[in-house]
Image (cartoon, rainbow, N blue to C red):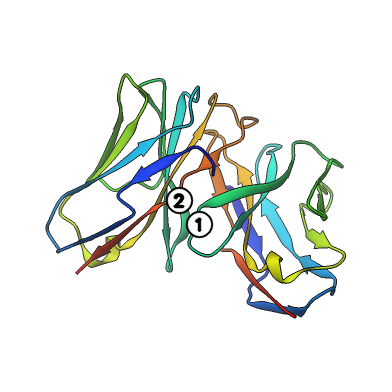
Amino acid sequence: GDSVTQMEGPVTLSEEAFLTINCTYTATGYPSLFWYVQYPGEGLQLLLKATKADDKGSNKGFEATYRKETTSFHLEKGSVQVSDSAVYFCALSGSQGNLIFGKGTKLSVKP
Amino acid sequence: DSGVTQTPKHLITATGQRVTLRCSPRSGDLSVYWYQQSLDQGLQFLIQYYNGEERAKGNILERFSAQQFPDLHSELNLSSLELGDSALYFCASSVGASEYNEQFFGPGTRLTVL
């Protein structure tokens, strides 16, 4: 079945460091791809999405490009801030319209 | 604030009991999804309703059931609770049922089964 694999955390970075969180997927069709963020004690918020190959999703300095050839959707940010500390989930749209999530990557940014 | 509300925020109960979790979707959204987040299984899709009708089922146990009412709020019923049912339960809503419709998540209900 469809699945998402993302790098395990936790990831600890200093403020202004470059961030990459790897995400690869397995899917029979051509799903939409998403990154969600979960701040402590809160629900998930959509960070960015891409609906077809070579699309780039971007928001709040974060970017991810839908790479069909490598079945990847890696999340990047050029300069992280303490306020980016959260858990990040890569997800794809399942055949039933539901979301299929990776296990999440916890990011801690130190001042 | 996503506009999706869930009650209660926390629930503590004993094994064998039954609980009901409630979700109110964003105004205008017809679809409601339920997800379970646990340390073991991560975030898993349970069930989806669209405009009052069940539309899709995921890894939902037979002890669990859900419904969506005419006012579009939804309830998730968990019965014969086991320790392993302890988890964070999220509701999400979207305007339609398509994969292209963004899902907005509520703050979750944390269930602890003792």
| For the residues bearing labels 2 and 1, Cβ distance under 8 angstroms | yes
Chain identifier of the residue bearing label 2 in the image: B
Q: Is residue A58 left or right of residue B2?
A: right
Q: Quadrant of residue A76?
A: bottom right
- The crowding category of the residue bearing disc 1, from other C-alpha atoms within 10 Å (few below 14, some 14 to 19, many at least 20), is few
In percent of width and height, residue A53 lies at: 82, 40
Name the quadrant of the N terminus of chain B. top right
Q: Where is A95 relative to A66, above or below?
A: above
Which of A65/B68 is in front? B68
| Disc sitting over residue A6 in the figure | none
- Which residue type does callout 1 highlight? Glu
Identified at 27% across, 64% down, the residue is B112
| Disc sitting over residue B107 in the figure | 2
Identified at 66% across, 64% down, the residue is A6
Name the element at disc 1: loop
What residue is shown with label 1?
A: A42
